[in-house]
Image: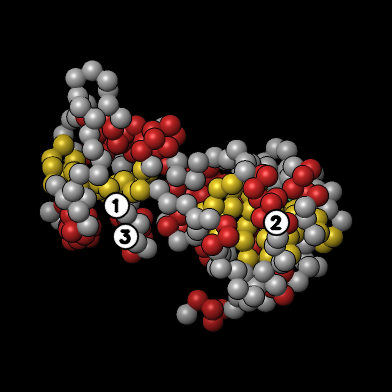
């Protein structure tokens, strides 16, 4: 976070200050920009979420805000921005009133959102997820594409999935791209990270259904009764599919029938189909209201 020469390391967790920043070379701005790098996110335990919707989603869900960057130009005319800033200061975190140039530099976009929140990362533990009698979990083997992961988290949220498990070497769920694609669902769906060996150990003690999706699966994906007990949907890597060890640990390997020339479906699309099939008996038009 420090440029290593003249500026001291900035404590990102310093409480409740409001500052104006206009220069992209400001050390605070530099330290936040560096959150675009996975290494910095891992070192600091922080990540960025762009836009007022995501900032409010996070605050409502109780995520800890570290810094809020707001557009200095839009602050006076936007009661929502003012409210977000007030909530941030009340939570003991910093507000930076930034020029649009600074916002663009932080978000790496020409048309930046008027608010960017820096939040503390939070992950869940698989054993702590309450699956009840029919809860559904999605487990992703080595997912590589942040857009796929974000889309899956959003879809999982929409269907009431209890958690998304990232197995093995995966993309960072807190990358800007993944967070953008979740449209805020990163703040409502518990995300678990674990190695394959740890997942297999947990699976050995799991009494529910583990359904793997596989291009060699022989069972139609509409056949299992996923809602009859707690279930895990196991989805494969974008290139390699499911590892042999994970495939062998499944109770059933299902396949979504295809016609046409496509070898397979996109991972996020396949996961969406699986999730909504697995939740079909439980989701009705009345269930959202
Ligand atoms: N070449 C890979 C393979 O042979 O497994 C293709 C992987 S596919 C792009 C990524 C994942 O999406 C698969 O591992 C599986 O979980 C899921 N998937 C895609 N199409 C599917 C289908 N028709 N039936 C079941 N799962 C599918």
Q: Earlier in the sequence, mark 1 or mark 2?
A: 1
CA gap between label 2 and label 3 equals: 34 Å
Q: Name the residue under label 3.
A: 59
Beta carbon of the mark 3 residue lies under 8 A of ligand 1: no
Residue 207 visible, this angle: yes
Local packing at callout 3 (Cα closer than 10 Å; few below 14, some 14-19, many 20+) is some
Q: Relative to 161, does residue 122 appear above or below in the rendering?
A: above
Residue 101 visible, this angle: no
Marks 3 and 1: in contact by CB < 8 Å? yes
The residue under the point 35% across, 57% down is: 63
Beta carbon of the mark 1 residue lies under 8 A of ligand 1: no
x and y, in percent, of residue 82 in the image: 17, 57
Q: Which of 17 and 8 is in front in this view?
A: 8
Marks 3 and 2: in contact by CB < 8 Å? no
SS category of the residue bearing label 3: helix
The residue under the point 68% across, 65% down is: 231
Q: Mark 1 points at which residue?
A: 65
**Disc number for residue 203:** 2
Q: Relative to 9, does residue 65 appear above or below in the rendering?
A: below
CA gap between label 1 and label 3 equals: 7 Å
């Amino acid at each position: 976070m420090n440029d290593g020469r003249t500026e001291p390391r900035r404590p990102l967790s310093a409480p409740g200050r409001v500052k104006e920043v206009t220069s992209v070379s400001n050390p605070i701005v530099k330290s936040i920009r560096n959150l675009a790098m996975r290494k910095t996110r891992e070192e600091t335990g922080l990540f960025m979420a762009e836009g007022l919707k995501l900032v409010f989603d996070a605050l409502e869900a109780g995520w800890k805000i570290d810094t809020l960057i707001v557009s200095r130009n839009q602050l006076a005319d936007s009661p929502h921005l003012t409210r977000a800033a007030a909530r941030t200061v009340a939570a003991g975190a910093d507000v930076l009133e930034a020029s649009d140039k600074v916002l663009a530099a932080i978000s790496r976009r020409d048309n930046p959102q008027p608010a960017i929140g820096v939040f503390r990362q939070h992950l869940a533990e698989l054993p702590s997820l309450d699956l009840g009698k029919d809860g559904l979990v999605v487990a992703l083997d080595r997912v590589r594409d942040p857009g796929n992961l974000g889309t899956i988290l959003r879809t999982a949220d929409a269907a009431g999935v209890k958690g998304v498990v990232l197995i093995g070497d995966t993309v960072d769920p807190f990358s800007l791209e993944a967070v953008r694609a979740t449209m805020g669902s990163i703040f409502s769906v518990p995300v678990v990270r674990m190695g394959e060996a740890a997942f297999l150990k947990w699976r050995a003690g799991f009494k529910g259904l583990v359904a793997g999706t596989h291009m060699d699966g022989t069972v139609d994906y509409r056949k299992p009764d996923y809602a009859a007990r707690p279930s895990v949907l196991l989805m494969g890597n974008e290139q390699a599919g499911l590892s042999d060890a994970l495939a062998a640990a499944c109770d059933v390997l299902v396949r979504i029938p295809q016609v046409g020339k496509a070898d397979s479906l996109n991972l996020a699309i396949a996961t969406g189909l699986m999730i909504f099939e697995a939740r079909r008996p439980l989701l009705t038009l009345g269930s959202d209201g």
